[in-house]
Amino acid sequence: MTKSLTLPRSQVLTFSSSHALTFSPSQALTLRLEGGLFSPDLLEALAAADLPGQKPQDFGLPPGRSLTAEIAAVFSDARALWQVFQNRLERLPADDLATSETREFWVIPLLRMLDYDLRYNARALDVDGQAYPISHLVVDGRGGEQESTRAGEHENRRAREHENRRAREHENRRAREHESTRAGEQESISRSHALTLSSTPVHIVGYRQELGRLAPSGRPRLSPHALLQEYLNRSEALWGIVTNGRTLRLLRDSTFVRRQAYVEFDLETIFAENRFSDFVLLYRLLHRTRLPAEGARPEDCLLETYYQQSLQQGGRVRERLRDGVEQAITILANGFLSSSPALTLSPSHALTLSPSHALPLYQQLLRLIYRFLFLLVAEERGLMGQNPIYLEHYGISRLRRLCENRAAYTNDTDLWLSLRALWKVLQDEKMAAILGVPPLNGELFAHQELDDAVITNRDLLSAFWYLSFYQEGSAPPRRINYAALDTEELGSVYESLLELPPAILLEMHRQSPEILRWTRVGEERRVHRFAITLHPNWSPR
C-alpha cells in the first residue's frame, strides 16, 4: 500500500472494487479523514462489512433484498440526478452560489435516497441566545406537526409562500383571536426548539461556496463548516452533516478548539468518475439508519458505536506504538554501531563498554525517535506543506512507503544522509522556505553527535517499520494513523522510555565475540533487553 500525500492535513484513502484498502497517488481521491474522527482501520472494516449494523435488515431493507443491489440502484439514480443538476448549474450566472439549485435538485433528493427526511428551518436555530442559521434538520417523517421536505420539492419557495400566507391570515384575524394565536405560535416555537435539542443538523449551502470560507456577503458570521461545528459543540446534537454538493463532511461534537475533525467525501469525483466502490462506503457510513433516531439517545446510534470502537482501537495502537519504539531503538542502536565503528558520544570521550556511557547514546536515540514521531504527525496533518520536492525526497512519510518495498532494504546509506540534510534544512529559515516547510529550529532538531554517524538503509527501514505499523497477535500488520494521535499521547510514549534508563552488560556469544546488551529495569523489576550486536571490527577508542 502506498500512502498518498496529495491532500493536506488528512489521512487519505481510496477503496477498490474488492473493498480492499488502497493508497494511490495517481488516482483521484474521494475520502479524507481529518483529525482522527475515525481510524483508517475502522473504515477498512466498514468497507468489508465487518462492523455491526452492516446487514441488509440493518438498513431497513425487506427480507431477501440484496444490499449490494440496493446500493447499485441508488447509485444509478444518483448519477442521473447528478447530470441533471450539472445541466442546471451551467445555465446559472457565474456569480450565483446556486444555493436553491444545490438543495432542491441535488442534495435533498440524494439524501432522500439514503432515507433522510429533512425539515427546512425557516428561522435560525437558537442555542443560549446565539443564532445558528442551519438549513435543515433530520426528522422521522411521521406526519403531524413535523413537516418533512421531500426529494425534489422547492423548499425555499414553500417557505416564502408560508410566510405570505401567515401575513395574510394575521391581517384578517380578529383582535379577540390575537392573543390565542400568539400563544399557539410560542407553543410551536417551543416544540421546534425541543426538536433541535437532539435532531441531526444537515447544513446545505451553494455548490459554489467553499465549506471552509465565509460567504461573499459575510453572512452568516462563520463558514459553513465552522457554523455546524459550533452548533454541535453547544447543542445536544451529537452528529451533523455539512455539504455544498461537491463535498460532504460528517462532523461530531468535539472538544478540540483549534483542530478540525471530520470525514469528507468528494461527491464530484464519485459521480463524475463513476466511482461505485467509493459510493458503497458512503452508503454504509451515512445511511439514515446510522444516525440517531428521533427520540432516542444520540449516544446509541451506530455512528457513535463506530466512533467509540475507533477510540478503543486507538488505545491499543498507542500500546503497540510503545512496543514499536522499543524495537526501533534496538535496531537503530545496532545499526549505528555496526556502520559507525568510530562513533563517539561527545568530544571528551568515546563509547566504551562502561555502563556510564550507555545513557548518552540512549538519550540521543530517543531524540532521534521523537524527531521521527513529530514529523510523522506533522506531515500526516498537512502541517509541513505540500511541496512535492519535500514530500518525495526529504519528508519522513516517504520512509513509510519505502518500508513496504523490499528492494529498498540495501546496505547503502543514502536515506540517512537525506535525513541529515533534512535536519539542517529545518534549522535554517531560508532553506526551509525554499522547500515550503516551516522552520523547526528548536532543541529537538539541534545537532547531536549521533547525526554525524551513518546507518544503512536496511537498518533504518527495519527500525522505521516498527514506527509505521502495529500488529495484534497473528493479525496482518496495520498502519498507524499518526494524524489521529494527540501530542500528549506521543509524549506519554516518549516519557515512558525516559523513566527507564539503560545499563550496559558485556556478554559472550557463539556467533559473535562481542555483544553489547542494554538492560532496563522498570518499577515492577521487569527487565527489557536491547541487544546491540557489535561489528566484528568494532573496538572502543
Image: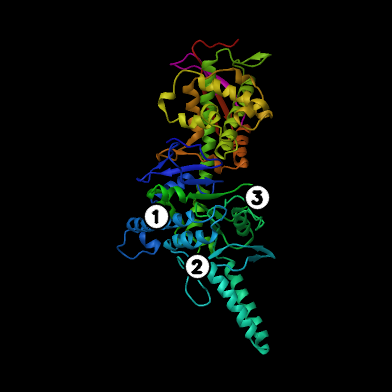
**Mark 3 and mark 1: Cα distance apart in space:** 37 Å
What amino acid is found at the position of numbered circle 2 in the picture?
Answer: His
Q: Quadrant of residue 200?
A: bottom right
Which residue is disc 1 drawn over?
Answer: 79
The question of residue 408 being in magenta is answered with: no
In-front residue for pair 468/277: 277
Q: Quadrant of residue 85?
A: bottom left
Cβ atoms at labels 2 and 1 below 8 Å apart: no
Considering the image in quadrants, where does the C terminus appear?
A: top right
Which stretch appears magenta? 500-517
Secondary structure at numbered mark 3: loop
Residue 538 percent coordinates (x, y):
53, 12
**Could you tell which of marks 2 and 1 lies nearer the N-terminus?**
1
Q: Residues within 10 Å of mark 3 (few under 14, many from 20)?
A: few
Residue 296 percent coordinates (x, y):
52, 67
Which residue is disc 2 drawn over?
Answer: 154
Up-down relation of residue 472 to residue 114 (above or below): above
**Mark 2 and mark 1: Cα distance apart in space:** 21 Å
Disc 3 vs disc 1: which is toward the camera?
1
| Residue 525 in sight | no
Secondary structure at numbered mark 2: loop
Decide if residue 311 is on the left or right side of residue 71: right
What amino acid is found at the position of numbered circle 3 in the picture?
Answer: Val
In-front residue for pair 211/98: 98
**Mark 2 and mark 3: Cα distance apart in space:** 37 Å
Residue lying furthest left: 64
What amino acid is found at the position of numbered circle 1 in the picture?
Answer: Arg
Which residue is disc 3 drawn over?
Answer: 257
How many badges with numbers are in the image?
Answer: 3
Decide if residue 360 is on the left or right side of residue 250: right
Cβ atoms at labels 3 and 1 below 8 Å apart: no
